[in-house]
Amino acid sequence: MLKQILYSKRLAPYIFILPFLITLAVFWVVPLGRSFVMSTQEVLYGQATFIGLDNYERLWRDSIFWKALYNSIRYMVLTIVLLVPIPLVLAAIVNSRIGSPRLKGFFKASMFVPALTSVVVAGIVFRLIFAESGSAMMNQVADFFGFGPVRWLREDLTGLTALLALALWRWAGVNMMYFIAGMQAIPSEYYEAAAMDGASKFRQFIHITVPNLKPTIVYVVTISVYGGLAMFLESFMLYAGNNSPNNQGLTVVGYLYRKGIEENNLGFASAVGVVLLVIVMAINITYLLASGTFKKEEV
Amino acid sequence: MATQQPTAAPVLRPSPPDRDDRSRRTSRSEGLSPGAAAWVQAGFLVLIAAISLVPLVAIFVGTFQDGNEVIRRGMTFDVDLGGLSLDNYVLLFTDSGPYFRWFANTFLLTVVQVVGTLLVSSFVAYGFAMYDFKGKTLGFIMVLLVMTVPFEMLMLPLYVQVNDMGLADTYTVIVLPFLASAVTIFFFRQYFLGIPKELLEAGRVDGVTEFGIFFRIVLPITKPAMAAMAILNGMITWNNFLWPLLVLRSPEKFTLPIGLNTLLTPYGNNYELLIIGAFFSLIPILILFLAFQRFFIQGMTAGAVKG
């Protein structure tokens, strides 16, 4: 009997994928299912009462939730605006034929290292770089340009600047690597033909590099969408906790953390989570459809 | 789809040297001679690299400064060289309280997580890569969905779930949900797709079981993929903050990120330890990075193999 199972080509694949199926069921489907249920309940001291869509209604009228959603979307859009073009241009420079390979290797390593830091360490360092005192690094930079000192983390837009600087520092190198890998797959004949026609390097970049990198760009944008909407820890570390002046650093996940973990209001927090999940899944399925995963994938 | 094998091709390939006259002619036609262009490029790259390294250099310099002073005034370009000392190092190695306990905890957790994740995830990936079976497409779409949904979406329900299961404050619950890691499964599947099926048939002819083929024939030839995924998962676990923050309660179980975060509280006098502790938490990863840069880059850009 056991022998039959061990040699069965029909059963084997199911046994191979079983750990994934169990993980999916126990740690994804069941919790998320309960999350939907809890979002229709008032959960207090372990007592759950069904209250229909009241949590969603409260959420709809909750100005702090809208602020958090606005902050998350703003951060997501701005990280995409920064973290696609800048790494793309850097990748093009590294990938050009001129220059020393050793220097480029050093450059790539220097850009990549920030991604190895934990959000805790990165947050601590950036909090200290963007400190309020006149002698803190960013205020020295501000002074050099003739303004400041700035109380970076007290004001909305300057706090956002610090957050974006942190994101740019940590992820520009990784995105650059994606683009370099994509560029190396573009046949060099394309560029040679364009050069023969007298196209400048800039026009080659716009008309050959960018269109041919479209799949990579779409991928990087997609992970930036998820990462941006789910951002929480960067803000949590930068503001040394989940509270920032006027909630300027509060994100949707931060609000979910506040309601669910800090205030133990599980029903309401679940509703926040469900709304966020619906947004992310809508984007996710759109992406999978657009990239043809459902059609082409011969799995 | 492209079944690019993510094995040998090093990402850090030196750029090809000028191969023909045509490319030289074009750069000349843009006004800068190739030599000058190379210098401009070099200057630019050095400048950007330097900016990128500033925060790391700052934290390194910070290990020699008075911690309370750094916290109060922030990190500065205007370092008082006379004020540098090894006091923090002395403190770290003589009187750092639980710091090395956190270090050891994190190390243990990372080793267990990496070994477990590599085994379980490659096992699952083999099923997806080597067999045709009913429900395979649906199953793999599930992998893709899990891979892209950020953990932050799951944290609250999962937290409630493990509390009910009585698993809060255990390492088991930190490790278990991530053994079948979607990214790792995805990466291994790509790798296995590049392995000739004849190898499996040869094993079957020799009377090896389906699982024996995986463990004895296929696993030994997946070392490059193992290396990339060991690095990726090792780094994720070493730096993991959110999930341990939710589930760990007992201070003696704290990991490095959790412990460092507790040093941020304004109570007590921990700032000397904060900077040097943060710096030392980076060292294992930096050493591994210098030794295995290629695998880091392969691992961390694993999602894009699909192209």
Image (spheres, rainbow, N blue to C red):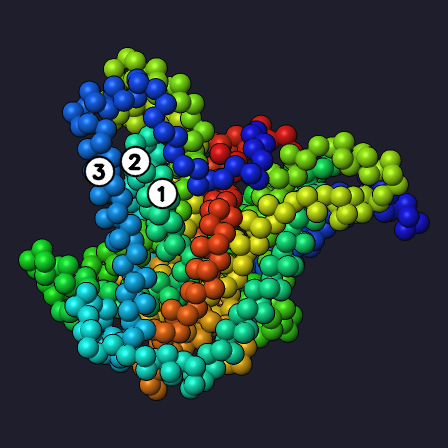
Chain designation of label 3: B
C-alpha distance separating marks 2 and 1: 9 Å
Foreground residue, A87 or B289?
B289
User: Label 2 near label 3: C-beta < 8 Å?
Assistant: no
Q: Pointer 1 indicates a residue of which chain?
A: A
Q: Relative to residue A42, is residue A7 depicted above or below?
A: above
Q: Quadrant of residue A87?
A: top left
Of A66 and B265, the residue lying toward us = B265
Residue furthest to the right in view is A1
For the view shown, which residue lies furthest in the left direction? A146
Q: Residue furthest top?
A: A197
Circle count: 3
Q: Are marks 3 and 2 on the same chain?
A: no
Q: Which residue corresponds to the image point at 87% horizontal and 47% vertical from the top-left?
A: A5
Residue type highlighted by circle 3? Trp
Q: Secondary structure at mark 1?
A: helix
Residue A24 position in % (x across, y down): 63, 53
Q: Which residue is mark 3?
A: B39
Crowd class of label 3 (few under 14; some 14 to 19; many from 20; radius 10 Å): some
Which residue position is annotated with label 1? A102
Q: Looking at the picture, how far across and down is residue B267, in whole percent?
A: 34, 85
Q: Which residue is mark 2?
A: A99
Q: Position of residue B173 (x, y in %)?
A: 61, 67
**Can residue A229 be seen at all in this image of the molecule?**
no
Q: Quadrant of the N terminus of chain B?
A: top right
Q: Disc 1 residue type?
A: Arg
